[in-house]
Amino acid sequence: MRIQSEFVEGFGTLAELGPAVSVFGSARTRPDSPHYRAGVEVGRRLAEAGFGVITGGGPGAMEAVNRGAAEAGGVSVGLGIELPYESNFNEYVNLGIYFRYFFVRKVMFLKYASGVVALPGGVGTMDELFEAVTLVQTGKLTAVPIVMYGVDFWAGVRNWMGATMVSEGYVRPEDLELVHATDDVEEIVELMCAAHPSVVAASRGAGGSR
Ligand SMILES: C/C(=C\CNc1ncnc2c1ncn2[C@@H]1O[C@H](COP(=O)(O)O)[C@@H](O)[C@H]1O)CO
């Protein structure tokens, strides 16, 4: 059965991955944009700190993050998705798996994530980000840092959650603290390192930059 084989292949391939951060973001981010440059920096700094990256393996922000990680010598995972039109891994993926089913792929994004970062994006990015928030909020996923990169970009969502969801009683105020927002790539790396001190120690032992 195709669904079962996708789970088996995903678990089998990723089980030995080591610490990695799942990074989501728009397929449409242009290579000449500040958000693409930020994605490259996120990938590069996470790799230097000892974390692999996991993206959707596609273009835009996914490519940027894979590029930064691969160029820094890190593990650069792409979880590709079969789409009605042709889609390939971006050239910076060095460990790739293809999925037909979004829901199987989403399990893989989070089961192997030591943290989650959302770069600016559209509905796909929102879906992946809020899946992570929901699983941590409900205790189905061990709490890991979840970061929105781009304070201005995400401000509307964050403000609405506070002003409407919390005040209507649909979200607990403390649940807002599950998600950090920053414009600083170093803060992302610090959050991941603080949550996973063993990665920092191993990275130092291997001659890493931290
Ligand atoms: C639309 C374009 C390419 C689509 N290719 C994708 N390949 C892999 N993963 C994708 C793709 N499109 C969306 N995703 C997933 O959703 C997130 C981005 O969605 P958004 O709506 O663009 O924010 C991303 O994290 C992927 O996991 C253009 O060439």
Image: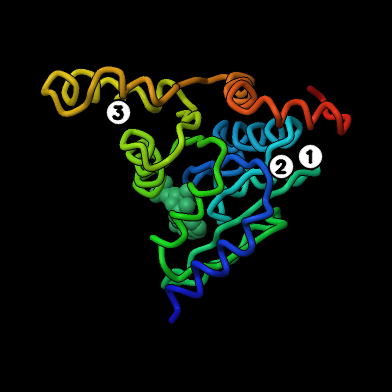
Relative to 171, 125 lies left or right: right
Instruction: Answer with the quarter of the image where residue 136 lies.
Output: top left
* Image color mode: rainbow
Identified at 63% across, 33% down, the residue is: 42
Distance Cα–Cα, label 1 vs label 2 = 5 Å
The image's mark for residue 179 is none
Nearer to me, 27 or 14: 14
Counting the numbered discs, the total is 3
Asked if 13 appears above or below 69 in the picture, the reply is: below
Q: Quadrant of the N terminus?
A: bottom left
Q: Does any portion of residue 160 appear in the rendered image?
A: no
In the rendered image, which residue does mark 1 sit on?
72
Callout 3: SS: helix
- Residue 32 appears in the picture as rendered: yes
- Identity of the residue drawn at 63% across and 56% down: 15
Specify the label residue 157 is tagged with: 3
SS at circle 1: loop
Crowdedness near tag 1: few (<14), some (14–19) or many (≥20) residues, C-alpha within 10 Å: some
Q: Are the residues at dot 1 and dot 2 in contact (C-beta closer than 8 Å)? A: yes
| Image position, residue 41 (x, y; %) | 67, 32
